[in-house]
Every structure is written in C-alpha cells, then in structure tokens.
Image (tube, grey):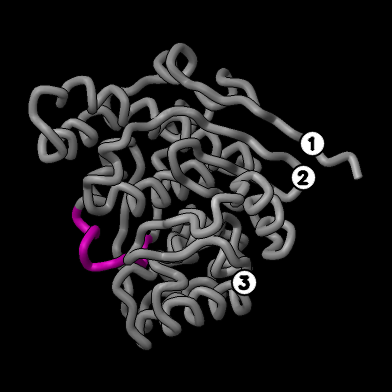
C-alpha cells in the first residue's frame, strides 16, 4: 500500500463524512465522539437493543467495543452486528481485555461466531486469546509477552486466516494482515498508552475509513497511518507538559493532520505476500 493511497482515503473520509455507529464502553464515549468529529466523521452512540438494528443499518460502519461489558450489551451488539451484516455495513470489533476474564473472552468469541466481522483490532494478548495461542497474557487491557518468542506478524496472519477477517495488532509497531499480506505501520507515540480511550478511538477511526467502501486491509492501514502521524504531531506540541495536554492536542491533531502530512510523515513497510 502506498502512502498516496492512504492520503487519498483520508480526503475521501472527510469528503463523505461517514456515520459511525459505536456501541462502546462507558469510559471512552465522549472522547471517541470528539475524536471522530475532529477527523471529519459523524459519530452516533446508541446501545439500546430496541434501536441498534435500525441505527446500524443507517450507518457507514459499526464499531463494537467490549470495554465495559454487560450481558445486555452483548445482546445489543449481536443484534446490531447481524443487522449491519444484512446491509453489508462493515463491522469492527475491539476485544478490550479479552483473556483477562472468562466473560470477556467468551463474549468476544460469541461476537466473532454470530457476526461477520470486517476488522478486529487489539493488542497481541487480546488477539492471541481469541485464537487460543499461548505465549501472551493480559494485564487489564495491556499485553505482556510471556515467552520472549512471540512474532506479532505471524500471530496477525494466523488470526486473520482463522477468524476470516482483517486483523490489526497495535503496539510499538502496528501490524495489519488479511491472512495473505502483512503490513507494518511505524508511526505513533508512547503517550497513546497513557491516555484512556486512545486505542478505542483508533478502532472507531478505522470504522470511519472502512465506511467509505475501500478494501478493509487498505482502510485499516490508512487509518493507522493517519492516527499515528496525528499522535506524533500531538506529542511534539505536548513535550513540555505530559499526557493530559497530549490528549487535547491529539484531538486537535486529528483535525489538523492533512493528506500531505500522511505522505511526508507516514511510515509503512515490511510488506509480505503469501503466494501459497
């Protein structure tokens, strides 16, 4: 994927102003909505099972985030996801904390079984637990490698094939795979891990990029490039302060980062293709 393609997709998102339906966690609702508005998308936060099917079918993309999970939330997510599938609306899953508790892991797996998911975004531990792969463990919503031998690119590729979706594993280097290709995004900043909701917002930003009708591998990668460049710009403006200022500057950067920034500052590489 070329940086010019990512730049074009950013321009297309802003031109189309897609509606992104979020069934997300209580901690990040406001930040997610503001981040999508800053990007140039339109957020809607609707989680009542009486209306989620209608809302999902009106949207350009549906984002399911299990951060603050209840039985009722899972039911609403399934209803919304299946309604979105009927209209071929892209569905993204953020399996926050999968592996930390039995309930979270089973809920994420239930969604993968009952809803056709377009993109799954998580850290390595979350993705590994969805796949049943040893060597990673969850610490709250963070990931820790336990054996020192984990290869995130292999994990992403295996997960994409097994789950039949595009898989995004975020970390120091972000990895995206559709089961054949593996793309590596080298943008971002460590302060993204110091702000509650930064990862959740990223999944919703990916939803905006998926909503404009592009291949999910390209849409997810373009969103990562854009978001990572914005984070770097925000960090430069916050260097004399800290994560609190960074959070505000990230919202500003999501609005101010343009297509030329993606071309000049974006870092993508390590493309592999499975010929077999």
Q: Is residue 231 left or right of residue 130?
A: left
- Residue extending furthest toward the front: 147
Write down the quadrant of residue 265 in the picture. top left
Q: CA distance from mark 1 to mark 3?
A: 24 Å
Q: Is residue 38 left or right of residue 90?
A: left
Q: CA distance from mark 2 to mark 1?
A: 6 Å
> Residue 268 at x, y = what percent?
56, 25
Q: Badge 3: how crowded within 10 Å, few (<14), some, or many (20+)?
A: few
Tags 2 and 1 in contact by the CB under 8 Å rule? yes
Q: Which mark is residue 180?
A: 2
Q: In terms of secondary structure, where does tag 3 sit?
A: loop
> Residue 215 at x, y = what percent?
65, 42
Q: Badge 1: how crowded within 10 Å, few (<14), some, or many (20+)?
A: few
State whether residue 119 is above or below residue 10.
below
Instruction: Identify the residue shown where x is 15% and y is 26%.
Output: 238
Query: Magenta segment, which residues?
Result: 22-30
Query: Of 118 and 270, which appears nearest the observer?
Result: 270
> Residue 231 at x, y = what percent?
31, 31
Q: Which residue is mark 1?
A: 273
Residue 59 falls inside the magenta stretch: no
Q: Is residue 196 left or right of residue 231?
A: left
- Residue extending furthest toward the right: 276
Quadrant of the snapshot with the C terminus: top right
Q: Badge 2: how crowded within 10 Å, few (<14), some, or many (20+)?
A: some
Q: Which mark is residue 132?
A: 3
Write down the quadrant of residue 251 in the picture. top left
Of the residues tagged 1 and 3, which is closer to the observer? 3
Q: In terms of secondary structure, where does tag 2 sit?
A: loop
Of the residues tagged 3 and 2, which is closer to the observer? 3
Along the polypeptide, which appears first: circle 3 or circle 2? 3
């Amino acid at each position: 994927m070329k940086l010019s393609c990512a730049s074009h997709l950013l321009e297309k998102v802003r031109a189309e102003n897609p509606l992104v339906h979020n069934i997300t966690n209580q901690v990040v609702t406001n930040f997610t909505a503001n981040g999508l508005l800053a990007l140039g998308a339109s957020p809607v936060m609707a989680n009542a099972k009486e209306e989620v099917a209608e809302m999902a079918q009106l949207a350009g993309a549906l984002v399911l985030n299990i951060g603050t999970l209840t039985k009722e939330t899972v039911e609403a997510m399934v209803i919304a996801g299946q309604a979105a599938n009927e209209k071929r609306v892209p569905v993204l899953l953020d399996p926050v904390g999968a592996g930390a508790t039995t309930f979270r892991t089973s809920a994420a797996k239930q969604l993968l079984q009952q809803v056709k998911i377009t993109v799954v975004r998580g850290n390595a531990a979350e993705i590994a637990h969805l796949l049943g792969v040893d060597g990673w463990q969850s610490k709250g919503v963070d990931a820790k490698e336990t054996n020192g031998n984990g290869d995130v690119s292999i994990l992403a590729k295996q997960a994409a094939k097994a789950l039949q979706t595009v898989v995004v594993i975020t970390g120091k280097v972000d990895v995206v795979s559709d089961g054949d290709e593996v793309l590596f995004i080298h943008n971002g900043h460590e302060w993204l891990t110091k702000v509650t909701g930064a990862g959740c917002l990223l999944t919703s930003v990916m939803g905006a990029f998926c909503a404009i009708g592009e291949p999910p591998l390209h849409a997810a990668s373009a969103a990562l490039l854009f978001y990572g460049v914005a984070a770097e710009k925000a960090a430069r403006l916050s260097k004399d302060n800290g994560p609190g200022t960074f959070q505000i500057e990230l919202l500003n950067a999501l609005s101010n980062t343009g297509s030329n920034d993606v071309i000049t500052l974006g870092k993508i590489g390590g493309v592999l293709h499975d010929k077999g």
